[in-house]
Amino acid sequence: MTTRIKIFKTPWPYVAPALILLITFTYVPVGNMLWYSFHKWDGLDPTMTPAGLDNYVRVLTDEQYWRVFLVSLYYFAASFAQIAIALYFAVVLSFSVRFRNLFKGILFFPYLLNGVAVGFVFLYLFQPDGTLDTLLGVLGLGGHTQQWLGDPDIANLSLAGTSVWRFTGLNFVLFLGAIQSIPGEIYEAAEIDGANRWHQFRHIIAPGIRRIISLSFILAISGSLSVFEIPFIMTGGANGTRTFVVQAYQTAFQFRQIGLASAMAVVLLLIVLLLTWIQRRILPDDEVTLT
């Protein structure tokens, strides 16, 4: 057997392109980000000034930087509503329902839209005398019009609602695919034993899609901490809507503090990893058996 044939019998020639792309576009940038986080650098000067842990100390002690994490709580709470809505429709549309393919398309369509386009659409919806105020006036509820994006107490609720509208479709598709992977014979046996829809959900569907539910919570945690497009497009971080990622973007590209922004990104990465580890400890990914 020649050397060339031996090489192609190993897995390395097949995984090498993917590994090269992964290292080049993921691990090398992360390594650069770590390096920048220990320096003071404006992103343009050819030399960087070593800063030690100063950037991390500033991120963790300056109220301006850690206070924006409180804004993420709006999106974190909204993600639970998003998961509940997606799970409800996935369960309902997994059974025989009239026009269910139409409803599937309607639910998934917002996720296909570009985040910038969604931001502009809802910007016109929430602006004073905009679509929402007009609709409330037509319904005789004109007294309930608000400064949907101008009032700090309401702006984050408006933005979190926009996020729910856009990302419910993603959770819906994940749940629906997991539900449809459960063998139909199990439902038929349950119906013969007299199980209604609630019993089927409680004893078949919920245990069968537990891994997907766990994945959805992980995505909800990381997503709520890294919200960027919607608040950046709709308010630019004004009126108390600045998220941690918007703050990091402005620090890096408006105030030219690349080192400090890199430290913020590293802190965010560590927080997401820590929360994911805690979530996995609380909800371990055990093997599920439905038979």
Image (cartoon, grey):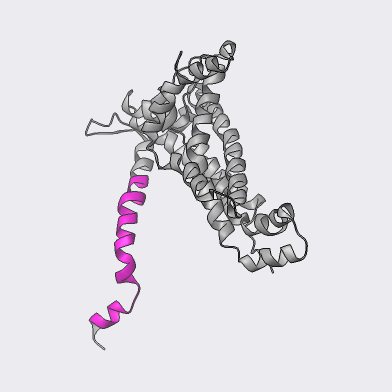
What residue is at 37 percent from the left and 37 percent from the top? 114
User: Image check: 10 left or right of 187?
Assistant: left
Looking at the image, residue 16 lies above or below residue 226: below
At a point 53% along the width and 30% down the height, the residue shown is 161
Question: What percent of the width, then of the height, locates residue 25?
Answer: 32, 50
Q: Is residue 10 depicted above or below 117 in this figure?
A: below
Residue 30: x and y in percent read 37, 46
Is there any visible trace of residue 148 in the rendered image? no
Q: Residue furthest top?
A: 143
The answer to whether residue 20 is magenta is yes
Residue at 69% across / 54% down in the picture?
Answer: 201
Residue 248 position within the rendered picture, expressed as x and y whole percent measured from the top left? 41, 30
Q: Is residue 241 left or right of residue 289?
A: left
| Residue nearest the viewer, comparing 203 with 97 | 97
Q: Is residue 96 visible?
A: yes
Point out residue 39 in the picture as x, y percentages from the top left corner. Answer: 35, 34
Please, is residue 281 above or below residue 259 in the view? Answer: below
Q: What stretch is highlighted in magenta?
A: 4-31
Residue sticking out furthest to the right: 194
Identify the image quadrant of the C terminus.
bottom right
| Quadrant position of residue 19 | bottom left
Q: Nearer the viewer, residue 168 or 239?
A: 168
On the image, which quarter does residue 220 sit in? top right
